[in-house]
Amino acid sequence: MALQVFTAVTGAGWESALVGALDRDDHGVTVVRRCVDVSDLLAAAATGTGQAALLSAELRRLDGDAVARLHAAGVAVVGLVEPGDETAAQRLRRLGVVQVLPADADPEVIARALRDAVSGVPAAGHDVADPRAALPLPSAPGEPERPPGGPGRVVAVWGATGAPGRTTVAVGLADEAARLGTSALLVDADVYGGVVAQVLGLLDESPGLAGAARQAGAGALDGPSLVALAWAVRPQLRVLPGPARADRWPELRPGAVRTVLEEARRVAELTVVDCAFSVEDDEELSFDTAAPRRNGATLAVLEHADTVLCVSGADPVGLQRCVRALDQLRDVLPGVEPELVVNQVRRGPVPGDPRQEVGDALERFTGRRPRWFLPADRRATDAALAAGRTLAEVAPGSALRTDLRALAAELTGTGVPAAGRRSTWRNRRAG
């Protein structure tokens, strides 16, 4: 049976000749619809009558979300560009089009690419840049340039609803990693109201993550443009603020967020992402067509991260919420295995030794024991919040700061100076 193909190359001078050549029986391809724009192409894909789409880089309003929707509809995509136009080819690849060919390619070659795309065969013969190739963060004035390193790591800081201290952990982890010599990028991806910019005393009206997602959706995001959108807080630490208002969550499309994180791997050795709490994945069930998913950005981060830290409060309410959140995460993303971080540990909310009691409870109900315990230090966190600074700046001797430093050292594989190892809670693992 011939491969059913949609085309969306309107306006190209070579369209008619190509469609006629592809429709020949010996190519095994049949053009079932010539679409006039992206909307027409998506509508055709939703009918289930085609298996692949052939589109040109010049197609108006083509973005990463449209390509993702084609893939979700089971339609493979092959791109065509004017011969020698590597810029257009690179844009299509950034949008998620793996197979990209020059428009003057032999029809049999194009037909073979369509068949390969449908069967999932990777593109061959294309010099596609590895998105994980690392680029150095620009150095501060007077600081020597950092040499390029390997692929950067992504750490997602997630946790149940309430206030278990996700942002405190994310900010502290990124700041301490930077102080240990690791180039770090802190990303605020909380779609329910991120506060990283406010916590660090930054203007929250900058484009930040939303601007990066827009560029990613248009296939225009690269390492330098991502760095330009991020605030340089101090040497080795940059911050990509989240949307200033929670109702702007539709700007953070899952596909675009994944692209941002891929670019983040190139510009920083460690990317720390402050996530929202909710992982519900049922918003689209209320719609007959593809609809924005508020929690899609959170799910994309959790799927993409190398390490997921689940932050839990150390009180009975926080522990109960953590247990339920982990159970829900297991249903939605069974392949994600978070590491537990118990925050705000103190005597009082639970009887006996809080570390032992909390560790036993979480192991009993979740099957896993916390790897890290962070002490409650309200005076230090209040001082940092009031000043719009990090714990290391306002309370360098804080026990919480010391343990966050040890956590950063373990995640980045760097050593902690002896002077920074004193703490009564000193990153001791339970069990």
Image: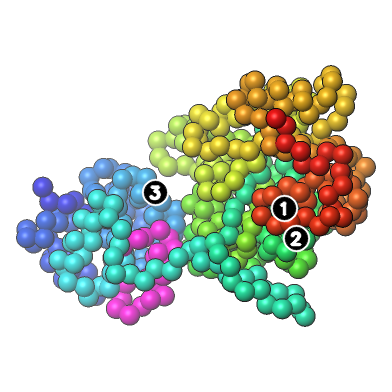
> SS at mark 2?
loop
Q: Which mark is residue 193?
A: none
Among the 4 quarters of the image, the one containing residue 57: bottom left
Q: Is residue 28 left or right of residue 144?
A: left
Which residue has dot 3 on it? 69
Q: Which amino acid lies under the numbered mark 2 shown in the image of this protein?
A: Leu
> SS at mark 1?
helix
Which residue has dot 1 on it? 409
Along the viewing direction, whichever of 328 and 335 lies nearer the viewer: 335
User: CA separation, marks 3 and 2?
Assistant: 42 Å
Asked if disc 2 and disc 1 are in contact, CB closer than 8 Å, the reply is yes
- Residue 82 located within the stretch drawn in magenta: yes
Q: Is residue 345 left or right of residue 100?
A: right
User: CA separation, marks 3 and 1?
Assistant: 40 Å
**Crowd tier of the residue under label 2, counting other residues whose Cα lies within 10 Å: few below 14, some 14–19, many 20 or above:** some
User: CA separation, marks 2 and 1?
Assistant: 7 Å
Stretch of the chain drawn in magenta: 81-99
Which residue has dot 2 on it? 180
